[in-house]
Amino acid sequence: MPEYSNAHVAAIAYHLPSTELTNEQLNADFPEWSVDKIMNKVGISVRRVVAENEFTSDLAVAAAQNLFQQYNLNPADIDFLLLCTQSPDYFLPTTACLVHERLHLTPSSGAIDINQGCSGFVYGLSLAKGLIASGDATNVLLITAETYSRFLHPKDKGNRSIFGDASAAVLVTSNPIGGRINKVVLGTDGKGAKNLIVKNGAMRFPKSGDQALHEDEDGNLFNDNCLYMNGSEIFNFTIESVPDLVREILERNHLQQEEIDLFVFHQANRFMLEYLRKKIKIPAEKFLIYMEHCGNTVSSTIPIAMKHALQEKKIKAGSKVMIVGFGVGYSWGGTILQF
């Protein structure tokens, strides 16, 4: 096998639900949480959230259809579907099977779900790259789709200010077009699982209708049916793990930091991103932040940001782009795309 496989990110599209959650709406629910305070802390002005009858499969299908239309792609050419989500339509069957049917992909193509969060896009690229390197696939459709808004308690001002719902679709192909996926670095530390979790709802702890509210150290209210995030622990994990991850990505790909043209990190929140940028000593002009109009969309943040970088010509032929994902699990991953 060559040093780098012939797997390329050839096309990117995304979809946002139509319903908006603005800072003004959050301020109406939490008067102490001013519009300016929200913007300054998280760097988000608007999030998109799904309607009552809108689910992950709907977002996934919409993103894929956008991809097919924008790039004039034929669904019959897709020979594997990878769907990254932590908010599936059902426990079973896999949401990927539902999306496969609605997109009219061929029966000979595979389809699986990946339960992965903020590092899910990088993990998905690694799996797609492996399918192509093995010869088992030529064109992999990688979709990331989340409806985290369904996990959030209405009185949880912190998480409601951060997370938005979205989906993204990417064509990973053996054809030498777009950005070649170079060496991928992945990592896991399950000791941090308790710090970002929806405790109830699966087999170990079924969802309960009688749940007392808890208050975290920042005054956010939640219960065990909803998403809990220990913000300080997540921050500590991120600032400790991501600089080392960046160094390892560079080492594995035999590059110096100065050779990277653009850094696209998981869009967690503006404060965290700026802290990381300064700690790693990345120039502001090489560091992409795109989340103000959609929020933290979990596994879709990187492809959404990359789509806008491509449209704005921040990524062009010859560009080396480092992508870095990190978060729930704990889990992290990164690679360099060579355009």
Image (cartoon, rainbow, N blue to C red):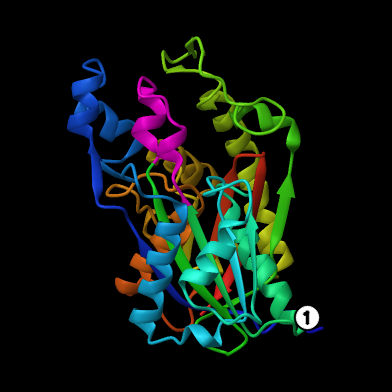
Q: Quadrant of residue 249?
A: bottom right
Residue 122 placement (x, y as % from top left): 60, 60
Where is 119 relative to 249, above or below? above
User: Helix, strand, or loop for circle 1?
Assistant: helix
In which quarter of the view is residue 67 placed?
A: bottom left
Residue sitting nearer the eye, 299 or 269: 299
Residue 286 shows in this picture: no
Residue name at image x 39 percent, y 26 percent: 158
In the rendered view, would you say 202 is above or below 263? above
Q: Amino acid at mark 1?
A: Ser
225 and 92: which one is in front?
Answer: 92
Taking 83 as reference, is 319 left or right?
left
Question: 174 and 316: which one is in front?
Answer: 174
At horizontal 36% and vertical 19% (from top left) the residue drawn is 155
The residue segment tinted magenta is 146-163
| Residue 64 placement (x, y as % from top left) | 43, 70
Residue 209: x and y in percent read 51, 18
**Mark 1 crowdedness (10 Å alpha carbons): few <14, some 14-19, many ≥20:** few
Q: Quadrant of residue 83?
A: bottom right
Outermost residue on the bottom side: it is 175
Image height of 108 relative to 31, above or below: below
Query: Does residue 285 appear in this view?
Result: yes
Any magenta on residue 319?
A: no
* Residue drawn at the location 62% of the way across and 67% of the way down: 125
Nearer the observer, 193 or 206 = 206
- In the rendered structure, does residue 157 fall within the stretch colored magenta? yes
* Residue annotated with mark 1: 134
Q: Is residue 311 above or below residue 18?
A: below
Q: Residue at x 42, y 50 (%)?
A: 55
